[in-house]
Amino acid sequence: MKLKALNLAMSMALTASVLTLAGCAGDDGSNGVAGLDGADGVSSVETPNATNVSLKALTVEFNPVALPVDDATKTTLQATDTVRINGTDQSIGYTKLIATGETDNGETFGAVKDYLGNAITFEDASAYICNGTNDGVGSGLDYFSILQQGGNLYMVSQFECQIGAMYMSRLDQDGVTGALSIAPGSLEFIDQSPEFGGFVHCAGQTTPWNSHLGSEEYETDARMVEETADPVTGLTGNKYYDETAKFWGNDGTKLNPYYYGWTPEVKVVAGSPEYSKHYAMGRFSHELSYVMPDQKTVYMSDDGTNVGLFMFVADVAGDLSAGSLYAAKWNQVSDAGLGNATINWIDLGHTTNAAVRALLDADNDVATNDAPVFSDIFSTEDPAEDGSCPTDGFTAINTTAGNECLKLNDVNGDGNIDDTDGALASRLETRRYAAMQGATTEFRKEEGITFNAKDNKLYVAMSEVARGMENNMKNGEAETKYDIGGNNDIKLNYNKCGGVYEMDVAKDSTIGSDFVAYNMKGLIAGIPTDYSANPLLSANSCDVNGISNPDNVTFLEDSNILVIGEDTGAHENNMIWAYNIKDKSLNRMMTTPLDAETTSPFWHKDVNGFGYMTAVTQHPMEDQDGATDAQKQSEAGVLGVFDFSTP
């Protein structure tokens, strides 16, 4: 749908989105899923089971937010202030909970610590705080969850710096108004040292069993580390990898790339955080792991260039410590718009957290680096000029690391190269191994994931349609480097503004899940727009009345509303949108200050009877001269309170 450019002579308010909270069936009363055979997608696709209990029908209208056009609105957070539910107005708005640098209970929110629990400092001895605007390497606070456990509310927060900190607080909730606040004296640092520390924590989810499921993004290339690391210091000259050595007391020999790129989970047990990493779910650039309603199937996005899309199916509901991993194969049907494809899933094997953890830490001492190196897993040779492999037994692939020729080694050292080695390689080098098995590794900046249970649709944000997603192109210009030696499965037109894809899901008896996606097609795209002739809008290059470089997404359960956040430089101010999937209307719900991403939008429909949408303002005002230290702090807050009990 073409969105009309903003008319500044008008009020710059968008038409309010209207949503109806309805039941589980499609508009025609059906489940909306057609059977497929194995050639078209997944095998043995069956009608899905009902997965949710619907709410009473509600009509909801948001009071829209205008586009920021002056210093006052560009440099501050703007949020919708009113929602109309069944014809009755409710005052909502944004409430700040906490910002980086704030102190409580002897802790500083966002401060990072080393493996011995000592505070890490900058050269001037000030606290190393992950706020995205100081000298720390990283983007700042990214995601926080709201957890209901033991009659209490907790907030777990994760930070997107190379040294990935986590914190937990209790939340106080007003029993009458639903207003949330940080409980004084409750801020607690979460120790990740038993699992090698944290790393570039990006997006996350509050799981169906009320735990915090996080992510470790931008995993370091282990081949690069082995080839470049100094034998004495362990450092490589790569500032992103070397920064993590500060966690190990600046001793790079204790650092190993295979320690990071996993899915961490925090459970609250008897009021205390219980931390783990799920090695069985694979190692790559985790943007988000999203648990489906069966509490077994998990979709995982991979953020970067020439990346994959992954699915994990746990052995036991609510327990992600063991299961089977799958990688998506894009089978293109059309290149129109954002494209259209059927999807089938390539089995990467079954394993457990314990099996992978034993490889990473054979002597059970995290301070001693005895984890594998890249050459323990793969043999390599240089590709030929056309990207192929000169020697039989090697497989040509193209991933984030570019065109490579690889051959699997005896990973577990038992003298045989078998399925066990494949399963272990698939966890330590998930993207590379998936490409070797024929999976698609051409997606570009794959971001947030969410699910619409009433329509059985999964949504995945793609920040750009570019590079590997084009056909031997880079940003519309001829370039072979992203496709040479690979499958070249995806052949789409360049879109710098990106878009959101939808995927239908159904039961697959072979995989053993009721929620297997079998297609992938564009839902809503950003629109490149030239504003060079308009001084007020010249800082924008994607339509200001449309999305730009979508990042995290969340779906308001039982409704028609998909919430889309942005991580963009093509809008002067990043925005959060409410997109009605039925009538295609788009409503601006929130805008962040200059330079800030919108991260962490996540709907919490029922927290003791009240509803909230979380939101994080990440690295605001970082490039603005004269901005105060307070203006530059990453901030966690909620939009709400929503009351869906209105008759």
Image (cartoon, grey):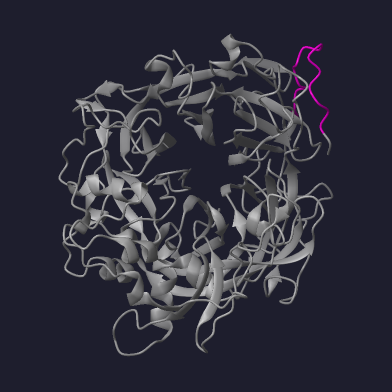
Give the prevailing secondary structure in the magenta stretch: loop
Image quadrant in which the C terminus is located: top right
Displayed quadrant of residue 389 = bottom right
Residue reaching furthest front?
385
Q: 297 above or below 419? A: above
Against 53, is 408 above or below? Answer: below
Q: Which residue sits at x=38%, y=23%?
A: 98
Q: Position of residue 129 (x, y in %)?
A: 30, 31
Is residue 357 located in the magenta-colored stretch of the structure?
no
Q: Give whichever of 481, 411 is nearer the camera.
A: 481
Query: In which quadrant of the rendered view does residue 398 lie?
Result: bottom right
Q: Is residue 327 left or right of residue 191?
A: right
Residue 222 left/right relative to 615: left
Who is closer to the viewer here, 469 or 347?
469
- Left or right relative to 238: residue 291: right
Q: Quadrant of residue 498?
A: top right
Q: Nearer the viewer, residue 646 or 538?
A: 538
Across and down, in percent, residue 624 comes to 48, 19
Q: Judge whether residue 452 can be spotted in this image.
A: no
Q: Which residues are magenta?
A: 3-18
Q: In x, y percent, where is residue 457? A: 68, 52
Apparent side of residue 13 relative to residue 296 in the rendered image (left or right): right
- Residue at (42%, 48%) from the top-left corner? 213
Is residue 390 in view? Answer: yes
Picture coordinates of residue 319, whole percent (x, y): 40, 59
Q: Residue at x 58, y 11 (%)?
A: 71
Give the camera-side residue of 536 and 432.
Answer: 536
* Picture residue at 58% right of the left edge, 49% below the top: 445
Query: Which corner quadrant holds the N terminus?
Result: top right
